[in-house]
């Protein structure tokens, strides 16, 4: 499982690969719940889960309960791109509960720790792509 930590102050995101033994910290949590960053290498940080996606790339939605994949009729929001005003469509999305089917969890910084995230995670997610292009 991968954890992506977004820092709104700097506008950067940091990807962390979560080992199998630490997956249990995330499984069973819902979107909007708080996490301690110490389990993922961000000592002193408090994180809030903002979403994620499953193995097939379906996004998690806050208003769909459970860990299931469901086909829901959407008119806006996560998992739907509007094609016109008033249009609705059935789209498959994941529920708001993290399970073993989730491959990426997104979180944002609620309370910062003593060290900057740049020091804890040397390369930001955007910087890796820029280095490959050079």
Image: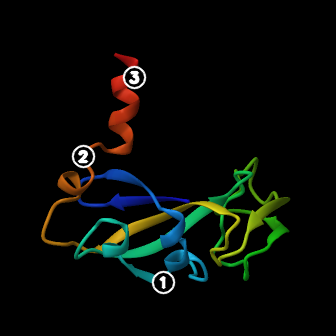
Task: Classify 23 as above or below 92.
Answer: below
Q: Quadrant of the N terminus?
A: bottom right
Relative depth, front residue between 74 and 70: 70
Q: Position of residue 7 (x, y in %)?
A: 30, 60
Disc ID at residue 33 = 1
**Residue 90 horizontal side relative to residue 27, left or right:** right
For label 1, count other residues whose C-alpha is less than 10 Å away and answer few (under 14), some (14-19) or many (20+).
few
Residue corresponding to mark 3: 132
**Residue 34 horizontal side relative to residue 51, left or right:** left
For label 3, count other residues whose C-alpha is less than 10 Å away and answer few (under 14), some (14-19) or many (20+).
few
Q: Position of residue 77 (x, y in %)?
A: 64, 63
* Secondary structure category for the residue under label 1: loop
Which residue appears at 48% of the width and 73% of the height? 49
Q: Position of residue 76 (x, y in %)?
A: 69, 62
CA separation in Å, label 3 and label 1: 35 Å
Question: Which residue in the rendered view is the most extreme toward the front?
Answer: 21
Which residue appears at 39% of the width and 22% of the height? 132
* Secondary structure category for the residue under label 3: helix
**Residue 94 horizontal side relative to residue 70, left or right:** left
Q: Quadrant of the C terminus?
A: top left
Residue corresponding to mark 2: 122
Which residue appears at 48% of the width and 71% of the height? 22
């Amino acid at each position: 499982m991968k954890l992506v930590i977004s820092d709104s102050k700097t506008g950067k995101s940091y990807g962390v690969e979560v080992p199998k033994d630490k997956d249990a910290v995330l499984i069973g949590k819902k979107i909007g719940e708080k996490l301690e960053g110490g389990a993922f290498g961000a000592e002193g940080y408090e994180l809030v889960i903002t979403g994620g996606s499953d193995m097939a790339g379906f996004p998690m939605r806050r208003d769909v309960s459970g860990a299931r994949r469901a086909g829901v009729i959407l008119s806006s929001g996560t998992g739907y791109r509007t094609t016109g005003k008033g249009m609705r469509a059935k789209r498959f999305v994941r529920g708001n509960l993290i399970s073993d089917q989730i491959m990426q969890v997104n979180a944002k910084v609620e309370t910062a720790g003593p060290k900057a995230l740049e020091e804890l995670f040397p390369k930001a997610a955007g910087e890796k792509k820029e280095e490959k292009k050079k």
